[in-house]
Image (cartoon, helix red, strand yellow):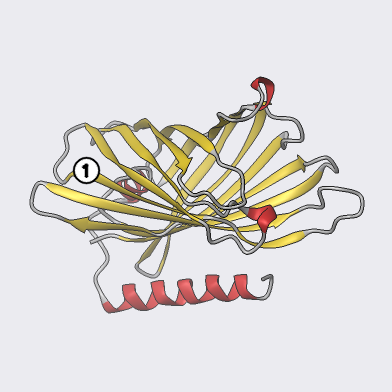
Amino acid sequence: MQTKLPAWAIVAWLLAVMVTAGGSAHAAMSATDLAKLAQNPVGDVISVPFQNNTNLNYGPEEGTQNVLNIQPVIPISVNSDWNIITRTILPVISMPALGPDDSRTNGIGDTQFTAFLSPANPGHWIWGVGGLVQIPTNSNSELGNDNWGLGPSVVMLRLEKGNPWVYGALVNNVWSVGSRDSESYNNGLIQPFLNYNFKGGLYLTSAPILTVNWKADSGDKWTVPLGGGVGKIFHLGRLPVNTQLSAYYNVVTPDYGADWQIRAQVQLMFPK
């Protein structure tokens, strides 16, 4: 797995360069406008974020867990009034040893696919509503669950031209629908986000991911992080690239949960 991951990144990178070399980038958009577009989860733009989350002091052995989320976002035009925004999350996981006699486990986790129905011409308030499917693609039982999952997903945000603030929240919940040997699950996610954009594509960001395991004991249900970081739009030729670096401290965490998360993201953008 460790030998394949760099190859995926290289292939995606080369594909991005070739696509943009053959087409025209959105030259009329400023770096600030591109940053705001990247901050819109239901924006009408093809993008491929590579989001790496390093979780410190994870598990009973207090090791380091690493999760690289490959998250292609593809908008589909239904008609002049509506878009469907598809978002796929494929996690590549490096799990530390969970016991003194265990070893590190590397592989693929379960894939989540979400499709949002969203207005094609929204006002200052932008929304999307849809469904989420969890697909048991895990390569090891420690990295996922063998049951499929289904649930709703909703996003709403405020984005106004000339206003440096972009803020909103994404919420979803997924229930297992299979009856395989793995335990059933009922997991929720809340991701509020707050961004302040400067001229030139630089911005401050806070987008903590709050998760809840509704089936866990009362003291082990929630993970609640606080923190933030900085982002910047760069260009490789005509290809816009959104980069972020942030850190979050888990003020609430289950037993053996991580206490810190370091998040780094590179997002390839393909504006129309």
Amino acid type of the residue tagged 1 in the rendering: Ser
Quadrant of the snapshot with the C terminus:
bottom left
What residue appears at the point 14 percent right and 47 percent down from the top-left corner? 82
Residue 201 locus on image (x, y percent)? 40, 47
Residue 94 locus on image (x, y percent)? 70, 57
81 on left or right of 270: left
Q: Residues within 10 Å of mark 1 (few under 14, many from 20)?
A: many
Quadrant of the snapshot with the N terminus:
bottom right
What residue appears at the point 48 percent right and 36 percent down from the top-left corner? 204
Q: Nearer the viewer, residue 213 or 64?
A: 213
Q: Is residue 174 visible?
A: yes
Is 255 above or below relative to 245?
A: above
229 on left or right of 190: right
Residue 99 locus on image (x, y percent)? 86, 48
Query: Which of the 4 image quadrants contains residue 93?
Result: bottom right
**Farthest residue, direction right:** 100
Q: Nearer the viewer, residue 75 or 257?
A: 257
Is 170 above or below relative to 95?
A: above
What number of labels is visible? Answer: 1
Residue 113 locus on image (x, y percent)? 40, 53
Which residue bears the numbered disc 1?
A: 118
Is 224 above or below relative to 185?
A: above
